[in-house]
Amino acid sequence: MKDKIIIVGAGLCGTLLAMRMAQSGYEVVVYERYSDMRKGVADAGRSINLALSARGLKSLEAAGIKSAILEECIPMRGRMVHPLGGESFLSLYSGREEDYINSVSRPGLNLALIEEADKFDNLTLHFECKVGKVDLKEASVEYTRDGKTHTDQGDIVIGTDGAGSVVRRAMMGQTTKLLFNYSQDFLRHGYKELSIHPGADGKWKIEKEALHIWPNGSFMIIALPNLDGSFTLTMFHPYEGEAGFNTLNTKEKVKAFFEKYYPSLLPHIPHLYEEYFENPVGTLGTIKCYPWQAYNKTLIMGDASHAIVPFYGQGMNASLEDVRVFMDILEAEGPNWETVFHKFEAARVDNASAIADLAIDNFYEMRDAVDDVAFMRKRKVEMKLEQQFPDYYSKYSLVTFKPDLPYSEAKARGRKQDELLLNICQNDNFENIPLEDIHKQVMAITL
């Protein structure tokens, strides 16, 4: 048997990593603080449906489970925008028919990964085990279960335990020794989950194959489809002000607010008040840190090392991509953990920062710009470019549909393209400019 790997956290990243390492012959032990999802899922109000795209799919394909997961997904081919006082319209994600993202349930995907991971004889899953201490140098963990304290020793420890990572906190506790840098940046917005129930016949009440957006300047609601005919709605609102969660604290205020700002959505959510007052408000923040490893014995990845806001649909995809990149390096280098850890950091840190920045950009775009004239013109030009020129990818497409392109490069190229196209589309005569000329200009600044 190869080295013993202790993984802290059985979320999406942790279970996929455990599976991949078990496939490679390592002894893998996973500790998860929450109960086994196979005994029931109790995360109502905090699931936020996920958008599974090319990077995540490539990582699932490497584990041999892509086809099975896709059966649990619904394709979303674009954004269905519902502007206040205007007609709804569909903005496709790409000018290529094969480019789309997939709506998938977070708990459903996590459950599927747990079931797959549990098939390996050399992989052990422990639930309801709260890791409290991590010995970074000795690769050991101390955890409690049923009120009793236990320890376990491995050859390495990998923390995939999310934004509140106990493994990362252990690294933060040795800041001067590790020269550990850490930052967190919270939006002044939070989120609250609502839903559209299935129709009487089990059908979807609004367009099924789209991500829906009700934009309103400083706040918005999005909706993603579910297999049962429902939609998961997520309110992204500030905490304060007219639209603030702290302000909308009575049924009368919520009713008046939705009638004013979400009139087209209101008929689909007769249960609004029950969900609004029962479901919690979640926070939205970005976490960046460095280094991601300590003493060549302990490593963090996924949200533990780079939590981001959900507005590019890449948080999960970036975490799953971490696993694929890590395993590619491990397979090339063998269990030389010092080399593997340092090469993994070098491959991922800048890219994690890039997608974090792009996610913030997209928050403002989805909230403020999807119904802006220049933005809509730009999207039309991008659609035409992608339809006619196979070598052109918009910024969104570079991130979402080019899994071999590093996030950092997608960010740099995409921002240059956006600046150029927005300048062109500010001109009311932009449609008179030959598409071939626009393509040449774009390619000249990005190649």
Image (cartoon, helix red, strand yellow):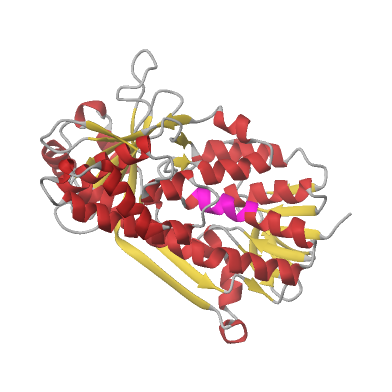
What residue is shown at x 26% (from left), y 34% (from top)? 272
What residue is shown at x 20% (from left), y 26% (from top)? 267
Q: 264 or 126: which is nearer to us?
A: 264
- List x then y, in percent, for residue 392: 39, 45
- List x then y, in percent, for residue 27: 81, 53
Q: Main secondary structure of the magenta part?
A: helix
**432 relative to 175 in the view: left or right:** left
What residue is shown at x 75% (from left), y 54% (from top)? 29
Q: Quadrant of the C terminus?
A: bottom left
- Vertical comparison of 388 with 182: above or below: above
Q: 391 or 195: which is nearer to us?
A: 391
Q: Quadrant of residue 269?
A: top left
- List x then y, in percent, for residue 284: 37, 57
Label count reads 0
- On the question of residue 132 being in view, the answer is no
The reply to whether the magenta stretch includes residue 24 is no
Q: 216 or 390: which is nearer to us?
A: 390
Q: Quadrant of the N terminus?
A: bottom right
**241 relative to 207 in the view: left or right:** left
- Vertical comparison of 48 with 66: above or below: below
- On the question of residue 78 being in view, the answer is yes
- List x then y, in percent, for residue 56: 55, 45
**199 relative to 338 in the view: left or right:** left
Q: Which residues are magenta?
A: 316-324
The reply to whether the magenta stretch includes residue 317 is yes
